[in-house]
Every structure is written in C-alpha cells, then in structure tokens.
Amino acid sequence: MRRHLMWALCVGLLSTSWIASPAFGQADSAQAHLAAARALAYEPGHDYTGSFEVICVPPQPAAARGAGGGAARGAGGGGGGGGRGAPPREQWYAEPARLFDNLYFVGANNDSAYALITSEGIILLNTVPEYGVEAEIIEGFKKLGLDPARIKYVVISDARNPSYGGVRYLQDHYPLHVLSSEADWNVMARTNVADNVRPRKDMVITDGQKLTLGDTTITMYVTPGHTPGTISTIIPLKDGSRNHVAAMLGGRDPLVNGEGVQYFPTDLDAIRLWKTSVSRFRDIAAKAGADVFLITRGQNDRLPDKIHALKYRKPAGPHPFVDKDAVKRYMNMTSECMDAQLAWRAAN
C-alpha cells in the first residue's frame, strides 16, 4: 500500500512538472522579449519610453483591462467622446510649429496633426478632438501663415476621437475630402460620439493607395490592430536642399474596443494583428528609406521635446527629427513588446 502511494505521488509530481514546464518556458520567453524591447526604448533625442511603459507591461486582470490597463485594453476612457465637455485649455493646447519646409505641426499636446504643404494645396494628416479644432487647426494655420481654405484632403489615421474629432467641423466649413479605411469608416459610424461630431463618410483608402496633390505623393497602408482599419503613411519631406521620408505609424497599441465599439473578438486577435502590421510597416518604411518617425500621439515619441530642440538648431545643423535608426527602433520595440504580450498570455 505504501509503495502504491509513493508511486502515485511520483507520477503526480512528474505530471505537474511536465505541465508547468511550458508555462515556465513562456515566462522566460516573455522576459527575453521584454529585455529586448527595453534596450530599444531609449536613445538620446529619440525617447520611446512612454510607449514602452504602456505596451510592454504584463496583462492585467479583466477588470483592470476594462479600466484602461495593459496591452490590448479597451479604449473607451482614452479617446474623448463627443458628448463630454472640453477639458481646460491648458491641459491640451499646444503651439503650432514648422517641422520641415513642407510639414507643420498643428496638433494638441498629445494629439498629433500635421499639415503637409504641396504646390496645389494642403493635406492634413489627422485632426484633434472636436473641442480643439478651432484653436489648434484654424487658429494654428493662421499663426503659421497658412490658409485653412487650402486644405484639400484630410487623412484619418485611426477611428478614435482624438484623430477624427475635428473632421466634421472642417467638412462643415471647407470644400475638402476626407479619407479613411473602410473598416474605420464602419467603426466611426457606430461610435458613441455626438452626431454633430461624427464625420460624414467620404473617400475610402485601400492598402498601398497613393494620394497625389500637386508636387507631392503620399502612400497609405492599412495596418489593423490599433483599430480595425488603422492607416500608416509614407510622407516625402523637404529640409532646404535635403529630402527626407517620414513613416507615420497610425497608432501605439493594440485595442480591443473603443467609444462603444468592439474592434476585435479577443486581446490575442488585436495583439497578433498589431504585431503583424507594425512589422510589415517597418519593412515598408525601410524600403522607402524613411529617416523620420511620426506617430499620432505626441507623448509616444516625446514630440514636444523635438519641437523645442528645433528652436536651437544651428543653420544646416542636424535635424532633431531625422534618424533612420530611430524609425526602425520604435517598430522593433513594438514588435518585441507584442511578442512579450503573447508569451505572457501563453504562460497564463
């Protein structure tokens, strides 16, 4: 009897060890990806630690994720619904700035929007929430000596209020066209923003589509995972006699839902899609020779610090935004973070 009990105990211990071993292996894998991402998160002048500290944290319990914690979280609390009052101006207002000869920042403190100047008018890349559109875009244009009536196209990077909130105002006041992916148009039609904030559907972006205005052509790619039809864009830039190429990534993290709309069935779906999209866009950017990284939220790449550095740039000196390695580094960091997220979930 004693020998039988000892045999059963040994078999049980061996079985437990065999089951636990893969979980320990996945945990080790997550830590390895975390370490790789951490090593990519910071270089002087191109600080991505703000993104790292959001997308590379272990998954939280379901209740915490619903409140906005961890990767592939719900986005309901972060986007700004159309029915709420405007936050105090000092919390969101940012001065407009010239970044390159043909690119201007006209966004809010953490909601990036860019005016791309062409020989035949302006392409606006993203807007700001509805409460900031007059102050940031209309007044910002005038401060920069630009005419908002020359906006011919608005490209929406993702179906979240900080990116599209100002579009309806522009549609109501100017004869322009608005572009988004079919998937994100479908999301915007169902979000819980006020009807007078919801954009009117216009042009549909397909993957790899080019948009030419005058002497300038941008190329847009559908990169799902942040939202179902997130758009990432390749943009030609000018700095005196030098030409540059910007890679504008349409989001930071994988999201399951936002503003009352379910984007993807599960966390895993969002994470896998976002990893695939970011890795693909990294390769597209490399092939295009991208040496400037842009993203839709200014805290993700410390955009205000770069704008401030521009004020102290020497004539023909190094440009604070230009760094080919920094473009690749951000997207490699994101890819490693997504691998860590997948490994953490497999371990649990």
Image: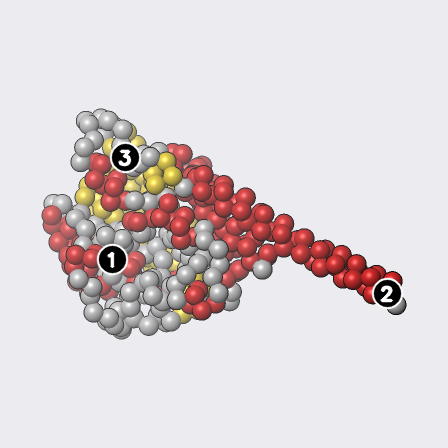
Q: Residue at x 20, y 66 (%)?
A: 86
Residue at 50 percent of width and 51 percent of height: 338
Please name whichever residue, 150 or 47, is drawn nearer the observer in this view of the structure. 47
Mark 3 vs mark 2: which is more N-terminal?
2
Residue type at mark 3: give it. Answer: Pro
Camera-nearest residue between 246 and 122: 246
Whole-percent x, y for residue 266 in the image:
51, 65
Residue 103, horizontal then vertical, whole percent: 24, 42
Q: Nearer the viewer, mark 1 or mark 3?
A: 3
Residue lying at the far front in this picture: please name it: 2
Looking at the rendered structure, the secondary structure element under dot 1 is: loop
Looking at the rendered structure, the kind of residue marked 1 is Val
Q: Amino acid at mark 2?
A: Arg
Q: Is residue 96 above or below residue 176?
A: above
Res 320 label? 3
Neighbourhood count class around disc 3 (C-alpha, 10 Å): few under 14, some 14–19, many 20 upward: some
**Which callout, 1 or 2, points to the residue nearer the camera?**
2
Tell me residue 262's x, y (percent). 44, 69
Look at 44% across and 64% down and name the residue there: 65
Cα distance, mark 3 to mark 2? 75 Å
Residue 312 in the figure: left or right of residue 348: left
Name the residue located 24 percent from the left edge and 45 percent from the top edge.
304
Residue placed under numbered mark 1 in the picture:
128
**Residue 183 in which image quadrant:** bottom left
Residue 160: % across, % down: 34, 62
